[in-house]
Amino acid sequence: MPLARYGVLKGRITQQLAGQGNSPHHQLRIIDQVADYRAAVNVRSALAPSELMFAVIDDFQHPLTEALQRLPPGFTELESRPGGMALDYIRGNLLGARRLKVLPYAEVGPANDLYDQLDALAQRVMGEGAANIYAFGEPWSAEPQKDKYMGFFPGAGIHNIHMNQGNDKSFAGDDGPWQDGGLLLSFPQADRSLRWVAVFLAFQSQALHTDDGTGHTIPAPAVRDGLVRIVAARLRAPRGQAQTVTLLNTGAEPVDLAGWCLADYRKARCPLTGILAPGAAVAVPVAAPLALANTGDIITLLDEAGLKIDGAAYSKRQVPAEGHTLILGA
């Protein structure tokens, strides 16, 4: 069964502790207006290989950030469904598999391990008084004792701040769609906008193709991942013209798109047809019920078996002027 509870903790970082022991977690002390919490971030896997896959996206653009900034401080429980604020690494197009890099937790030398990355981000949040952290995962409630790492009372916090689907069979009981963990950081800019930084973590034992209902691993031919890429979209088409999504065949063989489709955040789909030659790109007209929102959306490319081949996301402030094309997946 999936996580018992799922949500996001919004606050400010005041302290951090490096992970230690056999199952280390990088500990972050987070405060809201009335309480203290501890975010326990996994930094090493109990299964071999132990190094985590890790991605930092320094200018994160996604439609969910519009809703996140309106949240009050503290923990907010979230429904595990599309179209809301829940994270799903696969279905939410938060990042491509190509962006996940394997990093050890601690190595000799500067900026070459997971500790250095997390430490630098935490220091940055603590150094900017108006910056917020949003920690996604599974909460634990107030405990009748002090927090065992940071001493505040009562102890409370959030964990499972990593991908929570496609697990090895020994942890498959935690699987579920739309319940992934992660860290989002918001930094106010001079023009009153927010710059978002995203931190996503996954175990090397986890799969990047999972069942839509259970989140369990689906065996899939990895060679097809990213074979056809979503590279651009014309979102504000001139009157009388359709929106378009541009696809690129990166492979050495033609790809038959029969049975393939494009999907948006609401799971509306637009079927595809035709043969895409090697190295060729095609601007596919978007047809109802699929309609890409000018307030931000996701675009997912699915094959004839319903498996994700590629995905992209964009935010409201990325949408260009009428007739112009937005480059995606750079």
Image (cartoon, rainbow, N blue to C red):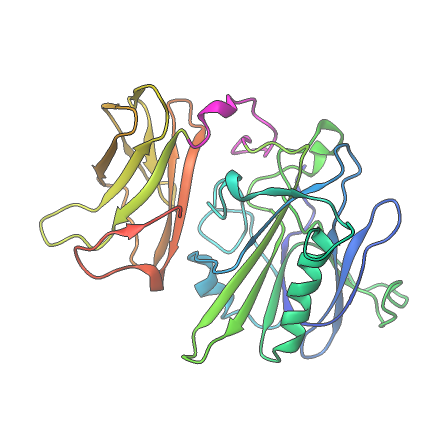
Q: In this view, does 241 lie to the left or right of 94?
A: left
Q: What stretch is highlighted in magenta?
A: 209-226
Residue 12 in the image: state x and y as whole percent: 66, 73
Who's the residue at 44% across and 25% down the image?
A: 224
Q: Is residue 313 left or right of residue 130?
A: left
**Secondary structure that dominates the magenta span:** loop
Q: Is residue 79 left or right of residue 243?
A: right
Q: How many labels does the image show?
A: 0
Residue 220 in the image: state x and y as whole percent: 52, 22
Along the viewing direction, whichever of 70 and 222 lies nearer the viewer: 222
Quadrant for residue 258, please give it. top left
Who's the residue at 63% across and 44% down the image?
A: 163
| Vertical placement of residue 232 versus 56, above or below | above
Residue 307 in the image: state x and y as whole percent: 45, 28
Residue 61 in the image: state x and y as whole percent: 43, 58
Image quarter where the N terminus lies is top right
Who's the residue at 52% across and 59% down the image?
A: 58
Along the viewing direction, whichever of 112 and 272 lies nearer the viewer: 112
Q: In this view, does 191 lie to the left or right of 274?
A: right
| Vertical placement of residue 150 versus 160, above or below | below
The answer to if 256 sits in the magenta stretch is no
| Vertical placement of residue 239 versus 172, above or below | below
Can residue 75 be seen?
no
Who's the residue at 64% across and 52% down the image?
A: 6
Can residue 274 be seen?
yes
